[in-house]
Image (spheres, rainbow, N blue to C red):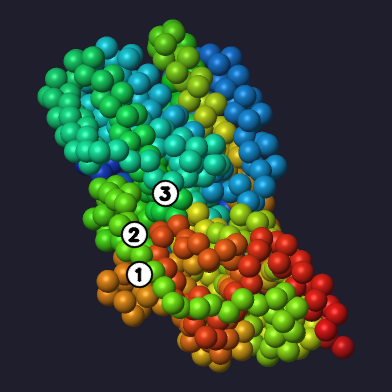
Amino acid sequence: MIAFTELYVFVLAAFVGYQVITRVPPLLHTPLMSATNAISGISLVGSLVAAGAGAQGTRVSTILGFIAVTSATINVVGGFLITDRMLKMFKRVPKPPTP
Amino acid sequence: MPVRDIFIEATYLAASVMFILGLRSLTRPEFARRGMQQAAIGMVLAIVGTLIKHEIVEYQWIVAGLALGTLIGYPLGMFVPMTAMPQRIAISHMFGAVAATLVGVATYYNSGGVLSHGEMTALGFEVMFGSLTITGSLMATLKLAELMPGRPITFRGQNAVNLTLFAATFGIFIYLIARPDQTMFFYGMIALGLVIGMSMVLPIGGADMPVVVSLLNSYAGLASAATGFAIGNNVLIIAGALDGASGFLLSILMSKAMNRSFSNVLFGAFGSVVTTTKTLATGQTYTPVSAEDAAMRLAYAGRVIIVPGYGMAVAQSQHVVRELAELIEHRGGDVKYAIHPVAGRMPGHMNVLLAEADVPYDRLYDMEQINGEFDKTDVVLVIGANDVVNPAARTDPSSPIYGMPILNVDRARSVIVMKRSMNPGFAGIENELFYDPKTSMLFGDAKASLTKLVSEVKNV
């Protein structure tokens, strides 16, 4: 059976996510998408193990792991960079200089 | 527990906390940037933690993958223009799904099919969500990038075919949980998932893309979370759950803003073609206006609201829009932007484009914030938006968009609509706003018209 602690973690994380994300204004919905994308690049954690298992794994799993590492890295690097680039653009009305 | 394992778990815990704080920072634009930078540090920590795991014995493939991924990811992050953002987001869902699916296949392959029922359930969800997200996102990307026709591609009996595919996949999944050693069924399920992803997105047209892109975001997250279950990794479960929840919530918001029911979204039936009920406005007349007259009215207006739509994105005219708004402000007018939730091709599309053009974000207003202000507004300038300003959504129960929340542009004192021609928009629905006596139509390419308006306002 799936360990129940893992199910707890999933349900609670989804709940926290839902609570946090309902408060993200529509203004930032695109950066939100790219941010969650970058964060889900954490699947790199699984890919790394597949790509580096050496003799404990198989040739096939190493190659699949290599492609998975590449894809996940694209999301991590590209995702965080583009989120930052977008967030950098959001500026307030400049305050008029006080005389 | 050896020190190494404690350290690894600590990096995962830190990463999870930083991810949640990073997303929380997105509730306030002024903190968002720093929060996401912290989340990136969390990611680096988790990667370092993983690299020292004792399961990892050789590094050449890892280094190669990290290097190649960075080489591709860097330009995708730094050089993709904001106008290409919808397809950029869609393709990143694909990369996430590829990673999850391949890790699932690798795990299954190495196990030789010797798996507990619980492990098989997790793996099954992983490759199922993963495979349908791969092709679904690819289709969405091709459509958004206009490498494929954006209109819905449908054929007779499509719904029956899709339903059969779903049922078959579900059946195979159940069988696999009972008999994890049935290798052919495992790969068969992936193949079916790939077909479903394609057949799900093909019948969906451009204007429905915000829902699809959000839904694929959610599926990619769920695939990651399932990976976490399969390999027993909590940080993956947490990140996947966050991603899944976010995409899920966005798809609910988008479908509400588009007047589609939630179950409609869950089952992917949102592509069902809108039957075009053309209550054609025969006999109705519209008022064309020249750029000179439109500019005159804008120049002397006290309160102006600009309503951008996909047409602004297509013409890439956000910079000219900002220039025009600044000119009006210099003359003493007040300019606000009204953003409908589904204007454009993804959630928040218009906001990003306008922010890129240096429009301050406190000038951008959501539908709820601004709908009460239209009746006090002298001129509303609609740029390439159609259905989101169609009063039929409020008044005509026979209209396919009846009930959809809209921007109450028709309540303003006067309206200028910029449009290419009188052709009805994507959904093929006639818009009576265009025939309203207080509405003037300014025909032509949005960018060209706006440039003309700018030079005319300067001359006033």
Task: Mark 2: give few (<14), some (14-19) or many (20+) Cα within 10 Å.
Answer: few
Residue highlighted by disc 3: B205
Residue reaching furthest front? B283
Q: Are marks 3 and 2 in contact (CB under 8 Å)?
A: no
Residue highlighted by disc 1: B279
Q: Is residue B246 at least partly visible in the picture?
A: no
Left or right of residue B328, residue B431 in this image: left
Q: Residue at x 72, y 68 (%)?
A: B450
Q: Residue at x 63, y 30 (%)?
A: B72
Task: Mark 1: give few (<14), some (14-19) or many (20+) Cα within 10 Å.
Answer: few
Q: Chain of mark 2?
A: B
Q: Chain of mark 3?
A: B
Q: Amino acid type of disc 2? A: Thr
Of B239 and B167, which appears nearest the observer? B167
Label 2, secondary structure: give it: loop
Of B398 and B377, which appears nearest the observer? B398
Say if B335 sits above or below B12 in the image.
Answer: below
Q: Residue at x 61, y 89 (%)?
A: B378
The percent coordinates of residue B419 (x first, y second) are 59, 66
Tell me, yes or no, whether dots 3 and 1 are on the same chain: yes
Q: Amino acid type of disc 3? A: Gly
Select label 3 or label 1 by which is in front: 1
The percent coordinates of residue B377 (x first, y second) are 58, 88
Residue highlighted by disc 2: B276
Q: Amino acid type of disc 1? A: Thr
Task: Mark 3: give few (<14), some (14-19) or many (20+) Cα within 10 Å.
Answer: many
Mark 3 vs mark 2: which is more N-terminal? 3
CA distance for labels 3 and 2: 14 Å
Of B413 and B32, which appears nearest the observer? B413
